[in-house]
Image (cartoon, rainbow, N blue to C red):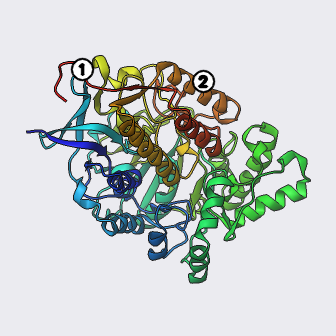
Amino acid sequence: MQQRYDAIIVGAGMAGIYAVYHLRKLGLSIKLFEAGSSVGGTWYWNRYPGARVDIESMEYSYAFSDELQQEWQWSERYAGQAELSRYFEFVTDRFDLRRDMQFNTRVSSARFDEDTAEWIVHTSDGASHRARYCVMTTGLLSAPNKPEIPGLESFKGPVYHTGLWPKEKVDFSGQRVGVIGTGSSAVQAIPLIAAEARHLTVFQRTPGYAVPLRNHPMPAEYQHKVKANYAEWRHKERYESFGGWVSVHYEPVPLMTQMALDVSDEERRALYEDRWQSGGLALYNVYPDVYVNREANDTLAEFVREKIRARVNDPATAALLTPNFPILMKRLIADTNYYETYNRDNVSLVDISKQAIETITPNGVKANGQEYECDSLVLATGYDAMTGALTRMDITGRGGVKLTDHWAQRARTYLGMMCAGFPNFFIIDAVGSPSVVFQPIFVSEEQLNWVGECIQHLDANQQRTIEARAEAEDAWGEECERALQATLFPTTNSWYVGANIEGKSHKGLIYLGGMAEYRRWFHEETARGYPGFVLTSGVREGAAA
């Protein structure tokens, strides 16, 4: 017999945890399904060496409960994977959320039943369930991208993906290790693997901009200071920052009001140096014109290039590690001794920018006509970001239309939350939203609050379903494209624009109009009675409710 719920939630990451909390408070019967054995999402699966958040712990946390903010004590400025896992476990147990969660259960398919206006959800344990609403909290970075490299299956040693790391410790002592990729995960893992391995060979297609993280134990006086003023701090994060974080030298950063090209070279360099010394992602909070003007961007990019060259002893290696594209258009990477790792005698860098890896052999990697022998391989090849977690499920809306078909040309959503032909199907913290460039916990809280208001509106007005209008999807796609093209982001191939997945369209993937403007969009939808959506009042005539 199928169990019925008001809402089924998919994924127990940061958004899924809050979805259970918030929707339960609204009085809904809910069930969350999670493929892993516990909560945490990205921080459950990403256990690779050095996995750590790059937004300050005091900020990378929930804001929905002041009691929670006061109770939890962070041990480091930037929490590592283990501490983040403990935090999400604590939140789950603190609010007794686990009783509405089912772990070790993957959702295999979800189909909208037009007769009953319900979603039928099938899970990996062979069961099926019904719910009026589907809330997809499957995450921004949760579908690992396994590269199609010839011969990969022939490799006789272990192969690890940073996004699917084993729970048990991996010991690289005495091994020849190959790491493919130099994105954020690789930059965090490489220094620690190099310290263990007999030899480490890094295969790099495109270098990134990495800046010092400068992590350290959390000062008790700083934690007390923030907790005493959390309301003001959160307001600055949400309304006065580029990405939802404001800390520089432990002081809030004011809104970016000056332009890089309007100040003297000395003043500009002093600001860059201040941000560099602060550590983490502080360089995102500089001058606004670095995002839209190549000349302004070059002032920051060259500043960081100089820093990279100063950290690497060998000029030829430094040149390979120095990017030549605009800075901040790919994710800025916060590192701990990454560049210094290439000064070690047991580390080699292989450039595969002009010619891709030829093949994986049973004993290693063949690139540029040479075989590099390896005992283990680490694939730090990222994710099918924003869409992959959903397109890898079998999701069917009205008229038997598959989500993969609906998104065949581009990712079509309205407000990054709903799709035409997929009633009562909510997407959180993923495609079409600002979550790529804004603190994802904040985005998920605000989106889920909107979902709750929407459900209450339906109930108060005896409405059964809500879905985006096709013309609203088109308009949102154009709005996303307009905001994207106003920046330098399209000049760089990155996962922000789907460039790491062959054939993936960049249109509609991300919204770069800013969190304030995004917030205005969905609040106006509510205030105007949801004009961008179709609301219906019942099920098919003659069908059982």
The quadrant in which the C terminus is found is top left
Q: Splitting the image into 4 quarters, where does residue 535 fall?
A: top left
The quadrant in which the N terminus is found is top left
Q: Residue at x 26, y 46 (%)?
A: 156
Q: Is residue 222 above or below residue 450?
A: below
Which residue type carries mark 1? Arg
From mark 1 to mark 2, how far is it between C-alphas?
34 Å
Q: Residue at x 71, y 67 (%)?
A: 277
Point out the residue furthest to the left here.
1
Q: Foreground mark, 1 or 2?
A: 1
Q: Mark 2 — residue? A: 478
- The answer to which of 518 and 43 lies nearer the viewer is 518
Q: Splitting the image into 4 quarters, where does residue 488 fall?
A: top right
Q: Is residue 202 above or below residue 426?
A: below
Q: Is 270 left, or right, of 48 in this rendering?
A: right
Q: Residue at x 44, y 50 (%)?
A: 179
Residue 252 location in percent, x, y? 69, 65
Callout 1 environment at 10 Å: few (<14), some (14 to 19), or many (20+)? few
Residue 154 location in percent, x, y? 27, 38
Q: Residue at x 26, y 49 (%)?
A: 30
Which residue type carries mark 2? Glu
Secondary structure under tag 1 reads loop
Q: Mark 1 — residue? A: 540
Residue 159 location in percent, x, y? 31, 48
Point out the residue furthest to the bottom here.
221
Residue 518 at least partly seen: yes
